[in-house]
Amino acid sequence: MRTTDSAVSEARAELEPEFRRLYGAHGRDLMTYALRRTNTPEDAADIVAETILVAWRKVGQIPSGEEARLWLFGVARLVLANHLRGSAAAVGLRSGCAAKSPRRWRASRAPSPRAR
């Protein structure tokens, strides 16, 4: 197991300079892309961080040249779609829970002051 771990570490160490170059060349553009499509800078930073994490995990599979940029933005698009789906689900869940909370249920079932 140790041999495999060291081989992976060595391979990543060889690819790290290329990965740093890739991030340096496209990181700012990825952030601009995410900022234009999210509600907060924090969400945009999360999108970029997740995109970079995917790129690091697949660093040996990233195409070279201009295709690398296209690949990164494709990953960012998918990460953004997942983020937006999760945000929509969270909003729906919060509003659904609020509508069914016991306090609201009791308030809606309480007799009105005029009914007395």
Image (spheres, rainbow, N blue to C red):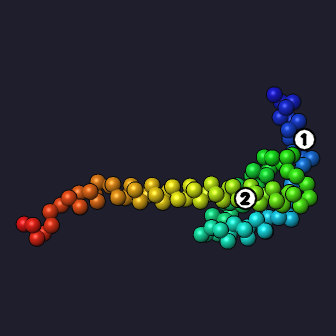
Q: How many marks?
A: 2
Image quarter for residue 25?
Answer: bottom right
Kindly tell me whether residue 21 is visible in this rendering.
no
Check the image and report above or below for 56 versus 73: above
Q: Which residue is mark 1?
A: 10
Q: In the orientation shown, which residue stands out farthest toward the left?
A: 116
Mark closer to the chain start, 1 or 2: 1
Q: Residue at x 10, y 70 (%)?
A: 114
Judge left or right: residue 68 versus residue 53: right
Q: Residue at x 63, y 67 (%)?
A: 38
Judge left or right: residue 96 versus residue 3: left
Tell me the amino acid under the disc marked 1. Answer: Glu
- Depth check: give the residue in front, 88 or 53: 88
Across and down, in percent, residue 63 comes to 88, 52
Across and down, in percent, residue 41 comes to 64, 69
Tell me the amino acid under the disc marked 2. Answer: Ala
Check the image and report above or below for 45 versus 79: below
- Depth check: give the residue in front, 27 or 61: 61
What is the crowding at mark 1: few (fewer than 14 residues within 10 Å), some, or many (at least 20)?
few
- Depth check: give the residue in front, 100 or 52: 100
Looking at the figure, which quarter contains the C terminus? bottom left
Kindly tell me whether residue 28 is visible in this rendering.
yes
Across and down, in percent, residue 111 comes to 14, 63
Q: For the residues labelled 1 and 2, say whether their Cβ atoms are less than 8 Å apart.
A: no
Q: Which residue is mark 2?
A: 76
Check the image and report above or below for 45 versus 52: below
Q: Residue at x 85, y 38 (%)?
A: 8
Q: Residue at x 23, y 57 (%)?
A: 106
Give me the C-alpha separation between circle 1 and circle 2.
27 Å
Circle 2 SS class: helix
